[in-house]
Image: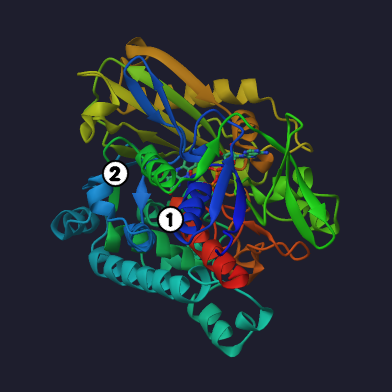
Amino acid sequence: MEQRLKAIIIGSGVAGLATAVFLAKNGYQIEIFEKNSAAGGRCGKIEREGHRFDLGATILLMPSIYRNVFSAMGLDLDMELEPVTLNPLYKLYFGDGSSFNYSRSEEKMKSQLEGIEPGSWKAYNKYVNEGYGFFNMAMNQLLNKNFYHLFQFINFKSLVMLFKLKVWIKHTDYVKRFFHDERLQKAFTFQNIYVGQNPYKQPAFFSMLPGAEIFEGALYPKGGMNKIVERFLKLAEHLDVKIHFDQEVEKIIVKGKNVSGILLKSGTEKYADIVIANADLPYVYKNLLPKSKKIKILNRKEYSCSAICFHWAVDKVYPQLEQHTIFLNEPYKEGMEMIFNQKSLSENPSFYVHSPVRNDKSSAPENNDSISVIVPVGHIDDKKDQDWEQLKKRARKAVVARLIEAGLDDIEEHIKFEMCITPENFENYCNITHGSVFGSLSHTIFQMGYFRPHNRHAKYKNLYFAGGSTQPGNGVPLVLLSAKLTSERIIKENS
Ligand SMILES: Cc1cc2nc3c(=O)[nH]c(=O)nc-3n(C[C@H](O)[C@H](O)[C@H](O)COP(=O)(O)OP(=O)(O)OC[C@H]3O[C@@H](n4cnc5c(N)ncnc54)[C@H](O)[C@@H]3O)c2cc1C
């Protein structure tokens, strides 16, 4: 009888679980070791007194990628998650107090756009069409493929692609070709923050984010984003994947040009034919592997921003909020500089609010809501003087003041309990380098495609990576793709 190959996965984030499912379906014997007592990592959940909060991811964007990965697993996204289609996708509040419902309804979008800037409806159509074109091109040539050698990337076709993707124009300059009104310029570029980067610094092709939002929409799985984790867990267990919680991996055991297993913090060694690290890649190089030159290289890379999150159980439902509400506050550009250059937070930062009860009654007791506020902030940087207690207070003060201004005047009186999660908490909970939760590695053009750390170790040929800091990138859709690509590579190289 043919012997089944054994693989160990370090971490049970979305990418770790999805890799487990793919490999188990292909006959691999899988064991997962997770440092925390629950699965999901940055796609986890917090439950308390009838309130449920998504720990990290809250919005299901680019559903085509989910459908593709789910169907490769033999799952039907719509049947498994019963997602709600959001319309509007979200509400934007600008610094001048005006608001904009970011909607897929042509009629609503047209009347709002033309009300702000005559002629902008036509420009908007051109902008999102081009953006979705960038998305499809990036998917085909940059994101949805395994890079086995350099010449797959350095060739004439890639140069043409980079040209077409307008990599030399900044997103915030590019958008000016379409809209004169500064509010619209912000409304169609702020999405860079989804991947933890500064819209003023990144290239035009990130208009693929608003493009994909409008063409594919945004979904919300009933029960929150953690439903994805629950579904994968169930499938993994059905496929006989063994998951060990509260088992932190201390080292990956290396033997010449291979790895032979892992050493747990408890002192136990576990052996396998293949090891897959779902834990953050730079953390793995620095902490789980022998010292190497790669650490210096990784230290020099760009990391995404981080976030301060507040989770509030409130005994009221506020009509001023949609399920997703974004406050773009002034001075906006300086706010970005504070995050990305000073690694800090401005006095009046922009932020995002999640209030799921409108579409999901199970997220809070009746007439209550489970509000999460995410305030993007600089990542942890030893060279900067960062006082997280102080920054947390600054963030909370600014958020409450802005919410009051938007009409939530009694918000403070209605908070039954609150929890706050800082970059340091994220760093400790998930071992995310610098607490850079939207990466950790940023998605600059030189950290994407072939240039992003590869999903197999260059020296240890049976050590693979799946997750946000390897190819193709971070965010639930991309880490799902990462799991699929890494599994395909493992199967190709080990059959
Ligand atoms: C505040 C916030 C908001 C977000 N919003 C969205 C959103 O709306 N939509 C979206 O698509 N994405 C969003 N994201 C990003 C998304 O959550 C992540 O891209 C995704 O969950 C990352 O999954 P992963 O499997 O790569 O890594 P992780 O979730 O980081 O999983 C890695 C796992 O490895 C474990 N681990 C680490 N070290 C060890 C060790 N030594 N031993 C054992 N286990 C270990 C960790 O505990 C963790 O469980 C958000 C993230 C945050 C933080």
Res. 134 image quadrant:
bottom left
Residue 443 percent location from the top left of the image? 58, 59
Locate residue 410 relative to residue 337 in the image: left or right: left
Q: What residue is shown at x 45% (from left), y 50% (from top)?
A: 476
Res. 313 image quadrant:
top left
Say which mark, if any, is on residue 477: 1
Instruction: From this view, report whether residue 380 is shown above or below residue 316.
Output: below
The N terminus appears in which quarter of the rendering? bottom right
Distance between the Cα atoms at labels 1 and 2?
Answer: 13 Å
Mark 1: few/some/many CA within 10 Å (<14, 14-19, 20+): many
Instruction: From this view, report whether residue 181 is shown above or below residue 373.
Output: below
- Color encoding of the figure: rainbow
Q: Which secondary structure lies at badge 2?
A: strand
The verdict on label 1 being within 8 Å of ligand 1 is yes
* Residue 58 in sight from this viewpoint: yes
The C terminus appears in which quarter of the rendering? bottom right
Say which mark, if any, is on residue 173: none
Residue at the front extreme, as displayed: 1
Q: Which residue is mark 2?
A: 220
Q: Which secondary structure lies at badge 1?
A: helix
